[in-house]
Amino acid sequence: MSADTVVLIHGLWMTPLSWEHWVERYEARGLRVLAPAWPGFDRPVAELREDTSQIDELGIEEILDNYTKIIEALDTPPIIMGHSFGGAFTQVLVDRGLGAAGVAIDPAPVKGILGLPASTLRVSFPILRNPANRHRAVMPTGEEFHYSFTNTIDDEAAAVAVYERYAVPGAGKVLFEGALSNFSRHAPLTVDFKNDSRAPLLLIAGGEDHVSPAKLTKSNYKHYKSDTSLVAYKEFPGRSHWTAGQEGWEAVADFALDWAQNPTALDADAGEATATTA
């Protein structure tokens, strides 16, 4: 029996509001959909912009613990889907034995992924350039957000509308911990790439993504070396990091769910036949 619950995990500079279209679409297909916030992010966008005190010291393990408790409280294992840092969290949670299947969309790199693209470094620099930002949340400027999320939107008014509706300060500690994963013995974004008991995992990349470019996500995919655990990769050309809301998001949402419900029926690379393994 396919999982009847989907847990959606948002990324940095976002809240669960970023999943609003996906929640509605998946519920229309008869699924129970949960989109819990990172601790402290369960507030309106305007409030988060005004007061970051609840998220200034938020770290990755606290976020992972929050989602672990939510998932373990469910009657049956859910499909876990995450975007950006949520995609990295999805990989960790699935590696820890949670979920019936995992889908990591434009994931932030987990420990072991080297050689970050220049665009990824450019996106991270406004926070990482100042060590003090490790202890506070930082709001992206409109220009920074456009480069990071809405680079495929030429209409300035439309890009600004996305920024105004969704963008929130990013917890600096999360980005610092992620950036330093390869230098930390017990990094919270550690996964066992050879884990044979992992639930099926799909990594989705966007061809125009500046935050997690397709080559970064494909490198992440190629690190998986399990003999029996199914891992697949799917790239959507022309998709930015704002793929959850960018025009044509329905194709991404439908593929992610269809694959997660029946991983051996869809080939991630070709969209048909059998699944791709690492």
Image (spheres, grey):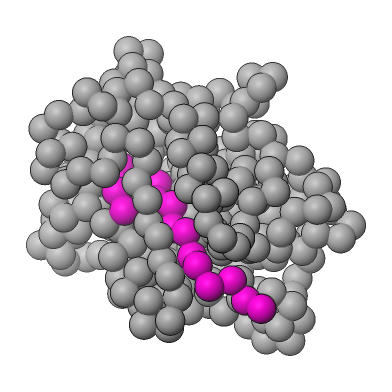
Please determine whether, in this image, residue 67 is positioned above or below residue 222: above
The residue stretch that appears in magenta: 1-16
Quarter that holds the C terminus = bottom right
Q: Is residue 5 visible to us here?
A: yes
Helix, strand or loop: magenta stretch: loop
x then y, percent, for residue 128: 39, 23
**Which one is nearer the viewer's eye here, 277 or 86?**
86
Magenta span has 9? yes
The x and y percentages for residue 267 are 70, 78
Report if residue 127 is visible in the image: no
Q: Is residue 178 left or right of residue 150?
A: right
Which residue is rendered at x = 53% and y = 56% of the image? 74
Residue for point 71% across, 83% down: 265
Q: Is residue 125 above or below residue 214?
A: above
Where does the image place residue 41, in percent across and percent down from the top left? Answer: 28, 40
The answer to whether residue 58 is left or right of residue 5 is left
Magenta segment includes 222:
no
Residue extending furthest top? 132
The answer to whether residue 1 is left or right of residue 118 is right
- Residue 65 higher or lower than 83, as above or below: above
Q: Image quadrant of residue 269?
A: bottom right
Residue at screen point 51% across, 37% down: 64
The residue closer to the viewer here, 178 or 159, is 178
Report the quarter where the N terminus lies: bottom right
